[in-house]
Each structure stands twice: as C-alpha cells, then as structure tokens.
Image (tube, rainbow, N blue to C red):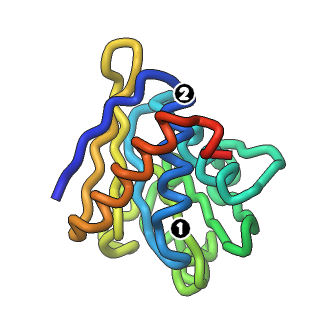
Amino acid sequence: MKRELFLPDADATGALGAALARVLPARALVFLEGDLGAGKTTLVRGLLRALGHAGPVKSPTYTLLESYEAGGRRVHHFDLYRVAEPEELEFLGARECLGDEALVLVEWARRAGDWLGSPDLSVALEMAGAGRRAVLESGSGALLDAVVREFETLHEDPSLSH
C-alpha cells in the first residue's frame, strides 16, 4: 500500500520525521530512499528531535552508522551509500542492531540486497518543484493512515513536533 505527501519545505520534512517518531513502534525497520540532498537526514533529524534528542544529527555517509538514545528509545541510522557488498553489513554490526529493540533507519537500503529483509515502512523522497514528494509504502494500511494523520496534525501546528 502507498500514500503520498507533499513536503513544501524542510520544516514539513522534519514534521514527517516527527510523525514517524510518534507512530512507529519501538522496534521497526524503515528504508529511506532518495537522491543525495533529497532530505533523508532532515527527516531523521525531525524524528530524533521529536524523541527529545537535542544534540547534532549528521548524515552517517562516512561513518555508515550513527546510533542514538532518545525518549527512552534506541535509534540506529545507517547510510549504505558507500557499501559495496551486502556482507559488509556484518562488519558494521547491522545484525546486532536489527536484533535490538530499536528503530532502524536505513538510507540506500538497496545496496544491502535481501540482507536486511522487508521493511515495516519505506519512505522515498523525490524533488517536486520547490519541495519534495514523500512516497510511503507499507504492508500495513493502518500504519500509513496513522503516519498521514499525525503528519497533517504536526504540519498544521509545527509547535507540536518538538
């Protein structure tokens, strides 16, 4: 199942991240797709801010993995752009992260082949004029509906996303 949202600016992208923080269970696998500069890290920053993380949030392009503890939750943020072979994920500790009671966010998940399994949610960000289009896919229509409802609430009143 799919849903689409228009994100007119970075604040809206952050609001989508905040909506995910509010709706996703403590243990979930989320694939984040989109070209370089599409807003994947902005979305992750919005998610972490909504969980109460006040520190820096950077793209793990070079480190490949950044882990956070926020709001009583563990979040692992992978960027697989520089991964050449799916087997490299073993050396990154990906198996342990996937076994955690954690929210696992994976950019460039296609580079892992079938190694990661199926995500609970996939978010593809695409340029759309001055903004972005977010295409959300999940096997759960209820999850998609909840994300869209929460996003619409947060986007209408941005003060709720912090």
Q: Point out the residue furthest to the right here.
A: 55
Tell whether 103 sits left or right of 71: left
Name the one closer to the observer, 94 or 136.
136
Q: Position of residue 96 (x, y in %)?
A: 60, 83
Q: In terms of secondary structure, where does tag 2 sit?
A: helix
Residue 56 showing in the rendered view: yes
Among the 4 quarters of the image, the one containing residue 10:
top right
Work out which quarter of the rendered image holds the N terminus and state it: bottom left
Tell whether 97 sits left or right of 112: right
**Where is 6 relative to 153, above or below?**
above
Q: Amino acid at mark 2?
A: Ala
First along the sequence among labels 1 and 2? 2
Q: Which mark is residue 24?
A: none
**Where is 133 relative to 130, above or below?**
below
**Where is 116 relative to 126, above or below?**
below
Tell whether 106 sits left or right of 7: right
Query: Mark 1 and mark 2: span between their CA atoms?
Result: 22 Å
Q: Which mark is residue 10?
A: 2
Q: Position of residue 31 (x, y in %)?
A: 40, 57
Residue 61 showing in the rendered view: no
CB-based contact (under 8 Å), mark 1 and mark 2: no
Q: In terms of secondary structure, where does tag 1 sit?
A: strand
Q: Position of residue 73 (x, y in %)?
A: 67, 73
Q: Residue at the location (49% across, 52% down)?
A: 19
Sort mark 1 into few (<14), some (14-19) or many (20+) by Cα contacts within 10 Å.
many
Q: Position of residue 143 (x, y in %)?
A: 32, 66
Q: Amino acid at mark 1?
A: Val
**Where is 81 relative to 92, above or below?**
above
Name the one closer to the observer, 112 or 41.
41
Q: Which mark is residue 104?
A: 1
